Image (cartoon, rainbow, N blue to C red):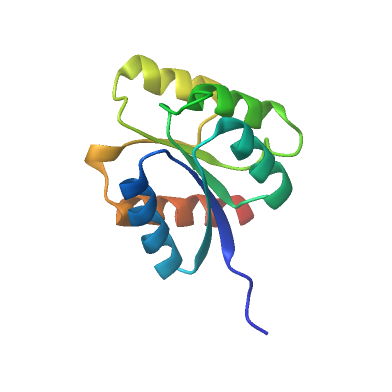
Amino acid sequence: MAEAPKKILLVEDDPMIVEMYKMRFEEEGFEVLVTDRGSEALEIASQQRPVAVLLDVILPEIDGFSILQNLKSSPDTRDIPVMLLTNLGQESDQEKGRQLGVADYFIKSQHTPADIIQRVNSIIINKTA
């Protein structure tokens, strides 16, 4: 019997980025869950238990830092690795992410989908080892 695909949650409001990352992660055998809403992201993470969350910071409704804080404060989702994937490159933003428990911080313009996939796989392997 085939292994079920690993689920990843992509929280992003730019349709072009969603399509690019969705396609690349699916090529690598992931099931990609997508939303651009913070409340929905929290619900999906709690119910679907993805192996990782890729989270933009600038979103409608709730910003990514608030979503991260909620994910890390819930017993259901606190152990899910969250990676921020954003255009915010200020050191203060990166530090805020680290303080809230982010597994990694990626500035969109400085990383390719292949970089992100490699890092997600590395985090998943280290988490299960």
Q: Front-most of 30 and 43?
A: 43
Q: Is residue 102 above or below residue 47?
A: above
Residue at the spot 73% in from the left edge and 47% down from the top edge:
47
Would residue 128 be found to the left or right of residue 13 on screen?
right
Residue 28 location, quadrant: bottom left
The extreme left residue here reads: 109
Q: Position of residue 73 (x, y in %)?
A: 69, 26
Q: Is residue 78 above or below residue 47?
A: above
Q: Front-most of 89 and 60?
A: 60
The extreme right residue here reads: 75
Residue 91 location, quadrant: top left
Q: Position of residue 24 (x, y in %)?
A: 37, 62
Would residue 20 be found to the left or right of residue 8 on screen?
left
Would residue 9 be found to the left or right of residue 120 on screen?
right
Q: Position of residue 54 (x, y in %)?
A: 47, 43
Q: Position of residue 8 (x, y in %)?
A: 54, 53
Residue at the spot 43% in from the left edge and 40% down from the top edge:
12
Q: Front-most of 64 and 94?
A: 64
Q: Is residue 77 above or below residue 20?
A: above
Residue at the spot 59% in from the left edge and 52% down from the top edge:
51
Residue at the spot 38% in from the left edge and 62% down from the top edge:
23
